[in-house]
Every structure is written in structure tokens, then in C-alpha cells.
Amino acid sequence: MSKMNDLIIKIKRKIGLSQRRAIYGYIFILPFILGFVLFMVKPLYQSLRMSMSEVIISNQGFTLRWNNWANYVRALTIDPEFNRMVVNSVAQMFYRSLATIVFSFFVALLLNQKFKGRTLARSIFFLAVILSSGVLVGLEYSNTLMAQLKATIEEAGNSNTITDVLEQILVSNTGGVNGISGKVFKILFEIIDSIYDVAMASGIQIIIFLSGLQNISPSMYEAAQMEGCTSWESLWKITVPMVSPLMLVCWIYTIVDFFMKTDNQIMSKINDQMVLQLNYGYSSALAWIYFIVCMLFIGLSSLIISKVVYNYD
């Protein structure tokens, strides 16, 4: 027994802190890895086969007739909507995700301050996570009373709001919609109009940023203040560099969350091809193209952001 304890002690001494953290990390993600291998690998393989085949449905089930890249060629060269939807989705995802990250970061900064009712304020912002969950969203869309209330509000609302008038003035005075300034203002007003969606999609990001802000040592701010550093300089020289690794995590999470939204045009098109038209091969090809575009964008943006992330021990 003593020899066993001595062996365990020697193993613990050889394993450093970083290796121990890596082991704990692998233990935490082990259930996901097992679930992916057991339940996701086979459907992914079947979907890939369908994307390269013509799926023939009969009374005996369905059979696959290999057609190489015909579905992909149809999606990229024949379908008049898919390429436009991909470009619009990526562009919309970029500025929506950027707005979500900025909004989440500054809300986390406010919630990290000491004030009365801070716990209640944090709970209110975390309600966005609960309200955007699948169960409550389904109840919201299936609720007849909510649907009637939404229609009544839209009918009673005035289309000539202050933001609409301001948008028309700024766009008309900056070269119209076709000008560069006009396009920038149009994107900004789209973000303003979708502030509800941005707030609903920022619950997890606020929690991640808040945990990172709480891990920053107060002595760093005290030392900076003694050196004459202002609050604005402390924000950019201490706060932002210390939470920059979390920005990469939040960015990837926000991108994946946006690509998986049910109100996405491409997701709706894939669902229509699969459910309504029973075109499993073509819908699988659309899904795989969309997945590859998502992975490429995540990889490219992560590579760019990782170059400016401040790594510390």
C-alpha cells in the first residue's frame, strides 16, 4: 500500500499544473466526445453519402443512386438563390456578431461595478438565456394570444418612427444607399432595429466576460492608478488585454449560434428542400456547403483574432 502511495506521489510531481489542467479539461469534455462518437458520426456519414447521391423514395424505404457532385454543382451554379443567401448570411452574421460582442462586453463592464441591486441586474440580463431557450421560444411561437398581440402591435404601430426618419435623412445626405456612407448607415440602423435580437443572443457572452473581469486582480488597477493612468487607459491597457482570450471564445460561440438560428434564410431553405419537397440529396448538399462556409469563416476569423490575443499564465 505504501509503495502505491509513493508511486501516486511521484506521478503527481511529474505532472505540472498546465498538464493537470489539460487532463481536467479532457475529463469535462469527455461526455461530449462520447456522445459525438456514438450518436453523431453515423448520421454525418449518411448525410455526406446523401449529398453525393440521388435519394429515391419508395414503399420499401429509400435507395441511394450515386451522382458524384451533381447536387453541389446544382447548388453553386444552377440555384439562383443559394449563393446570394450565403453571401447575405455571412455579411449579416459578421456585423451582428460584432454588435453582440461589443454589447456583451460593455454590459459585463457595467454589471461588474459595485452598486445596489447588482445581483438583480445580473439575473435580469441572464433572463435572455432562459427566454431564448428552445422550450420558451416554441411556446412563444405556438401561443395564439402572443401571435394576436404581436399582430395588433404591428398594426397599431407607426411606420414613420424617429429612427426611420433619421435613417432617411442620413442616407439621403450621404450619397444614397449605393454610396459607401449610405451602406454604412444602413448597416448601423439594421443593428439598431435588431437590438432585441442582439440582447437575446448575448446572455452567455455576458456571463463569460463577467467571469473574466472578476478574475482580474484589483492590484493591477491600483498600480495603474498610482502611476497616473486614467480609467479609459486602464480599460484599453489592462481590461481588454486580460479578457481578450475570452473574446475569441465568445466570437466563435456567437458565430455558431447565428448560423444555427431557425429564422436563418439558408436553414429555412434546407428545411423546405428536406421536409416539403423530400429532396434529401440536394438538402444534404446545401447543408454541407453551409457547414463548410461556417467552418472556413470560424477558422479565418479565429486565426486573425488569435494574432492580437494577449496570452498570459
Image (cartoon, rainbow, N blue to C red):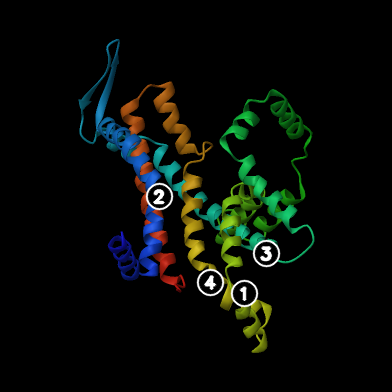
Which residue: 48% across, 66% down? 245
Which residue: 30% across, 10% down? 59
Q: Earlier in the sequence, mark 1 or mark 3?
A: 3
Q: Earlier in the sequence, mark 2 or mark 1?
A: 2
Counting from the top left corner in percent of width and height, residue 49 is at 25, 32
Question: In front: mark 2 or mark 4?
Answer: 2
Q: Earlier in the sequence, mark 2 or mark 4?
A: 2
Q: Splitting the image into 4 quarters, where does residue 38 fall?
A: top left
Name the residue tied to disc 4: 242
Q: Amino acid at mark 4?
A: Met
Q: Which quadrant does the C terminus fall into? A: bottom left
Q: Say few, some or many: other residues with alpha carbon within 10 Å of mark 1 (under 14 / 14 to 19 / 20 or more).
A: some
Q: Earlier in the sequence, mark 3 or mark 4?
A: 3
Is residue 169 something one can see in this rendering? yes
Q: Amino acid at mark 2?
A: Ile
**Residues at marks 2 and 1 touching, judged by CB atoms closer than 8 Å:** no
Q: Amino acid at mark 1?
A: Leu
Q: Secondary structure at mark 1?
A: helix
Name the residue tied to disc 2: 29
Q: Secondary structure at mark 4?
A: helix
Counting from the top left corner in percent of width and height, residue 187 is at 59, 54
Name the residue tied to disc 1: 235
Question: In front: mark 3 or mark 2?
Answer: 2
